[in-house]
Amino acid sequence: MKINPIKAFSDNYIWVIEEGKDAVIVDPGEYKAVLHYLEENQMTLKAIILTHNHEDHIGGVKAISEKFPDTPIYGPEETAFLADHVVKDGDSFDLLGKKFQVFKTAGHTIEHVSFLMEKALFCGDALFSAGCGRVFTGDYQAQFNALQMFKSLDDAVEVYAGHEYTQTNLRFAQFIEPANKNISHVLDQVTNLRAHDRPSLPSTIGKEKNINLFLQADKLQDFIALRNARDNF
């Protein structure tokens, strides 16, 4: 099993889960790079999974579906106009011989979900390395609840987020906690990776517990204050 990123737009990652020559695509915000990747690597598309209804995560679905019309699409209720398998919290399904568990991780959108495949978490915009998504719904409790769920996962779980926001998130974290050596150390590592155009992802839950201030917030009000500060950073 391999998981590779396809870059999209300025900072999106479309994740490709690969088992031999079979592939599952996560959040295809655009289609050209996906079709090129599948053709170049002679891969068979087995499914598309969607975390939420934002154009930079679903924009390529229709064109990919036209090319592969029998491909099943899994996503939350808010993507029902695209998904033929609408999933919700507590659901599970099998792809590529692996079990995918569904968790509701709302806040960024109303029905945002995340998928856990063994030790791989596909969390869209609900969790970033050193950050989390903007709470566009205004439902901070939902986003806080999602973070508590992420915090409960095994430290070894790898975090495959939807955007390359790590460097900016760490700069914000360093601004909030300038004496935090864990944050400074990881920021140096990420700065070096990005200087060579290498992804900062995947992270791990264990790593995020050390550097992600949003994940460390124990109270809703602390989270809200932190999120507001990040929005204005």
Image (cartoon, rainbow, N blue to C red):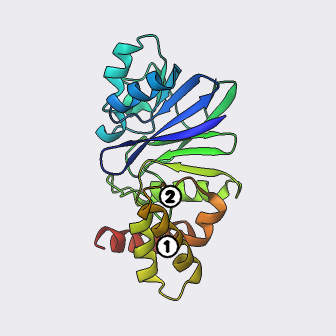
In the shown orientation, is residue 141 left or right of residue 100?
A: left
The x and y percentages for residue 215 are: 55, 66
> Would you call the spot at circle 1 few (<14 residues within 10 Å), some (14-19), or many (20 or more)?
many
**Label 1 SS:** helix
**Label 2 SS:** loop
Above or below for 109 versus 165 = above
Marks counted in the figure total 2
The x and y percentages for residue 29 are: 34, 36
Label number found at residue 138: none
Q: Which residue is drawn at 49% across and 18% down?
A: 72
Nearer the observer, 170 or 83 = 170
The x and y percentages for residue 134 are: 36, 58
Is residue 16 something that shows in the picture? yes
Residue to which mark 1 is pinned: 187
Q: Residue at x 61, y 67 (%)?
A: 209
Q: Name the quadrant of the C terminus.
A: bottom left
In the shown orientation, is residue 133 left or right of residue 10?
A: right
Residue to which mark 2 is pinned: 200
Above or below for 48 versus 221 = above
Is residue 81 something that shows in the picture? no
